[in-house]
Image (cartoon, rainbow, N blue to C red):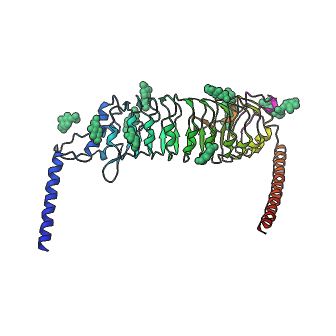
Amino acid sequence: MKMNVKSSISLFAILIVSDLVFSSFTPHPHEDQADALITWKTSLSHFNITGALATWNTNTTSSHTTPYSPCKWQGIVCSHNGRVEMIQLGNEGLVGDLKNFNFSSFHDLSELQLSFNNLTGSIPPQIGKLKSLTYLGFSENKFHGLIPSTIRNLTNLLFLKLNGNQISGTIPNELFHLSQLQFLYLDHNQLVGSIAPSIGQIKSLRELDLSFNKLSGPIPTTLVNISILAVLAMQNNQINGSIPEEIGQMFQLRYLVLGSNQLVGSIPPSLGQLIFVSMLSLYDNKLTGPIPIELAHLTALDYLDLSSNQLTGDPRELICALPELIYFNISHNMIEENSSLIYKGNLPKPPRLFRNGECVAANISRYLHTFNNSNINKRNCKDIIIIVLFSGTFILLVLFGVLLKRNTMKEIKSKWEGQ
Ligand SMILES: *[C@@H]1O[C@H](CO)[C@@H](O)[C@H](O)[C@H]1NC(C)=O
Ligand SMILES: *[C@@H]1O[C@H](CO)[C@@H](O)[C@H](O)[C@H]1NC(C)=O
Ligand SMILES: *[C@@H]1O[C@H](CO)[C@@H](O)[C@H](O)[C@H]1NC(C)=O
Ligand SMILES: *[C@@H]1O[C@H](CO)[C@@H](O)[C@H](O)[C@H]1NC(C)=O
Ligand SMILES: *[C@@H]1O[C@H](CO)[C@@H](O)[C@H](O)[C@H]1NC(C)=O
Ligand SMILES: *[C@@H]1O[C@H](CO)[C@@H](O)[C@H](O)[C@H]1NC(C)=O
Ligand SMILES: *[C@@H]1O[C@H](CO)[C@@H](O)[C@H](O)[C@H]1NC(C)=O
Ligand SMILES: *[C@@H]1O[C@H](CO)[C@@H](O)[C@H](O)[C@H]1NC(C)=O
Ligand SMILES: *[C@@H]1O[C@H](CO)[C@@H](O)[C@H](O)[C@H]1NC(C)=O
Ligand SMILES: *[C@@H]1O[C@H](CO)[C@@H](O)[C@H](O)[C@H]1NC(C)=O
Ligand SMILES: *[C@@H]1O[C@H](CO)[C@@H](O)[C@H](O)[C@H]1NC(C)=O
């Protein structure tokens, strides 16, 4: 017993001594990360001198051997074991590049947020070393060059925000292997080429923004496999072909924005199944044919822009059926510009206008110069609604009848087969 206590005490002493010796000869476990961050800071040609990087300092009054840690620096979040877990330097006036950022030092990093700075150069392939990354935010910088194929290694990524840069080349197929990805923003870059069908592999995607690039080719029908996609924005590209009918099966869609492309053919009536869509924008394409009345089922719709196409027909019935509609633009189509179709007056809901995906308040009346609902009085509206309701009920009854008949047939058939 005595021996045991004695030996454990001496073991303890040895541990303390060795720890002291150890710490005076080798850097503290946090110092490699602190050094890596200081090296990068030093390489920057500018940063906000009253911002987070002002606190990045290893020059303390204590002795040289005292361990230092970046965990108390602003913009740095450490995990409980003292390793850097997040680097959050959005809008810090950073000017410079990532050449001197030592990616090997941050295997545990889960968040790298550098949005709204002036970082230049390309995204280094070494980014693939940040295997624990869930959030990569490089939005609104001046990054150029290609998206590195090593992005494939970031298998834990949930957010990938590269929007608002000068990134060029095609979207690498490797990106579509990031099966956890929920938010993919590549908009406002210089991306070219077509969108590979393998994009349908990112089944957990909720928001996809590819707008304001130079993408061409068709809208991949494989998108329908991303059943939880809520935002699909591809406007201002050179996407061609027709709008796939299958989009009508993406039942979770809220925003469908395909304006300013080269889309041809008619608007698929299946879009009328997207009952959660609040924004549908197909402006400035080459769409033909009538506006499908099925769009009247989009009761959540508050923004509908079909302007600058070659659409025909009378949209008044549709407008009657869309109670939430605030913004509606069908100008520059082949709809007869009867004076009775000129809108004058205010829509019932507070007007809203979308700019750059942001919802900003606006007096909408001056934007709505294509539709005059002053001669659709309540009776007319009611009439149309009643007609729709009646025909809806009729269709339902017919369907019900057909189903009933089919079920009875099935029962009879199975009975026969059972015997
Ligand atoms: C610099 O950082 C300070 C503190 O975060 C902030 O108040 C200031 O607006 C920033 N200046 C610029 C130019 O971003
Ligand atoms: C480091 O600290 C010493 C003493 O506090 C000071 O004289 C020196 O200028 C500091 N160096 C830097 C780079 O801040
Ligand atoms: C980036 O630099 C431009 C001028 O080169 C400046 O106008 C702009 O404010 C800078 N942006 C940021 C976020 O520092
Ligand atoms: C980068 O960090 C790793 C691991 O901390 C280290 O081994 C390597 O020497 C560093 N590279 C440079 C260029 O500092
Ligand atoms: C990506 O992962 C592969 C396989 O795990 C590895 O061989 C490669 O070095 C990694 N690339 C980077 C940049 O980390
Ligand atoms: C959806 O995915 C399944 C299997 O994952 C595949 O067989 C099918 O072809 C895909 N559908 C489309 C339209 O890509
Ligand atoms: C779409 O554009 C690509 C490239 O610009 C072209 O090769 C292709 O023929 C076009 N397809 C259609 C249907 O217009
Ligand atoms: C335009 O007015 C003419 C004549 O009044 C009418 O026959 C036609 O149906 C109207 N067109 C639309 C789209 O309302
Ligand atoms: C809207 O329609 C009403 C009734 O038909 C008409 O009096 C009015 O002039 C039209 N408004 C415009 C701007 O044409
Ligand atoms: C909306 O703007 C129009 C002119 O653009 C103006 O006549 C009207 O009074 C405004 N309505 C409201 C509610 O501000
Ligand atoms: C309606 O669409 C036309 C053509 O796309 C555009 O010029 C006009 O500015 C739009 N109106 C509003 C209010 O956005």
Residue 314 location, quadrant: top right
**Residue at (76% x, 39% y) in the render:** 292
- Is 85 inside the magenta-drawn segment? no
Give the overall secondary structure of the magenta segment. Answer: loop
**31 left or right of 323 in image:** left
Q: Position of residue 31 (x, y in %)?
A: 25, 44
Q: Position of residue 345 (x, y in %)?
A: 74, 36
Q: Position of residue 348 (x, y in %)?
A: 71, 43
Ligand 1 falls in which quarter?
top left
Residue projecting furthest to the bottom: 1
**Residue at (85% x, 46% y) in the render:** 383
**169 left or right of 275 in image:** left
Query: Which quadrant is the N terminus positioned in?
Result: bottom left
Question: Between 308 and 379, which is closer to the camera in this rendering?
Answer: 308
Bounds of the magenta segment: 329-349
**Position of 188 relative to 25 (above/below):** above
Whether residue 254 is visible here, answered yes or no, is no
Q: Position of residue 10 (x, y in %)?
A: 12, 63
Question: Between 145 and 324, which is closer to the camera in this rendering?
Answer: 145
**362 left or right of 400 in image:** left
**Position of 285 relative to 327 (above/below):** above
**325 left or right of 223 in image:** right
Whether residue 74 is visible here, answered yes or no, is yes
**Residue at (37% x, 36% y) in the render:** 126
Query: Which quadrant is the C terminus positioned in?
Result: bottom right
Question: Between 162 and 411, which is closer to the camera in this rendering?
Answer: 411
**Position of 250 relative to 96 (above/below):** below
Residue 60 location, quadrant: top left
